[in-house]
Image (cartoon, rainbow, N blue to C red):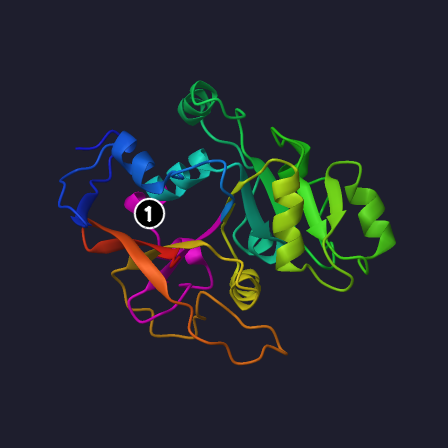
Amino acid sequence: MSERGAVIDALFPDRVADLGDDELLALYGPVDRSVPRLRANFIASVDGSATAAGLSGELGAPADKRVFDLQRQVADVVVVAAGTVRSEGYGAMRLGPEAEAWRVAAGLAAQPAFALVSRSLDLDPASDVFAVAPVRPLVLTSDSAPADRRAALEDVADVISCGATGVEPSRLVDVLVARGLLQMHCEGGPSLLGSLIEADALDALALTVSPNLEGGQGTRITHPSGDAAPLDLRALALDHVLNSDGMLLLHYSRRR
């Protein structure tokens, strides 16, 4: 049994039973930390729904949570859209003491940065996301964001414009890389993922396939923007396939 309770076996490219955290960190960690990488992490049911009862967390299981936490552990910054922060009930983004110790030993900051993406700045400056954050959060927004909301958030976060009327993916990446946050881990939501794909800014996707049928009105893991033109297919390479009691943990990278 693994140290975190959820047994995860590797099926591809090699078969390995009951992976330990060090083996998982080797799979999910960057090959070269000096090379910028933007990876998204999502979960979907077998029939393609990104949510159950309106929440992605309802599809999860201990194995998914374990890998989710380890991806945060190797990241320089966790990027989340404000809508996902609200709907999924995010609090302050803080890793546990073991993960913090691992990061320090690896020469990383004790905690990853937390970047919230919001065009409207519909965020509560008094929420735990800001009030008890271990690292001053970043808020990535647009020039057109309401000035009063920007002023309120500037007391608790670094508020940065990444576009005139919306958050442009290329500028989002440039802003984070300029701050030395090269390993970028995106946790949603679907609209943000859609914009990253449209801009061809996504380098990798960690996709968990939950062994459940949702069968309702759940959405896909990605939403296109309203004026998005049809895209050519984005070819990805399959890096690994893991299994935990029927839950598949897939990892894809951009074909070079």
| Screen quadrant of the N terminus | top left
Q: Who is closer to the viewer here, 54 or 23? A: 23
Residue at 74%, 59% in the rendered image:
163
- Residue 39 visible (yes or no): yes
The location of residue 194, given as percent across then percent down, is: 53, 66
Relative height, residue 182 to residue 22 (above, below):
below
Q: Position of residue 9 (x, y in %)?
A: 18, 44
Q: Quadrant of residue 141?
A: bottom right
Q: Is residue 123 visible?
A: no
Residue 209 falls left or right of residue 112:
left
Pick the residue in front: 254 or 163.
Answer: 254
Q: Which residue is mark 1?
A: 64
* Region rendered in magenta: 38-65
The furthest residue to the front: 256
132 in magenta: no
Q: What residue appears at the point 76 percent right and 64 percent down from the top-left corner?
A: 165
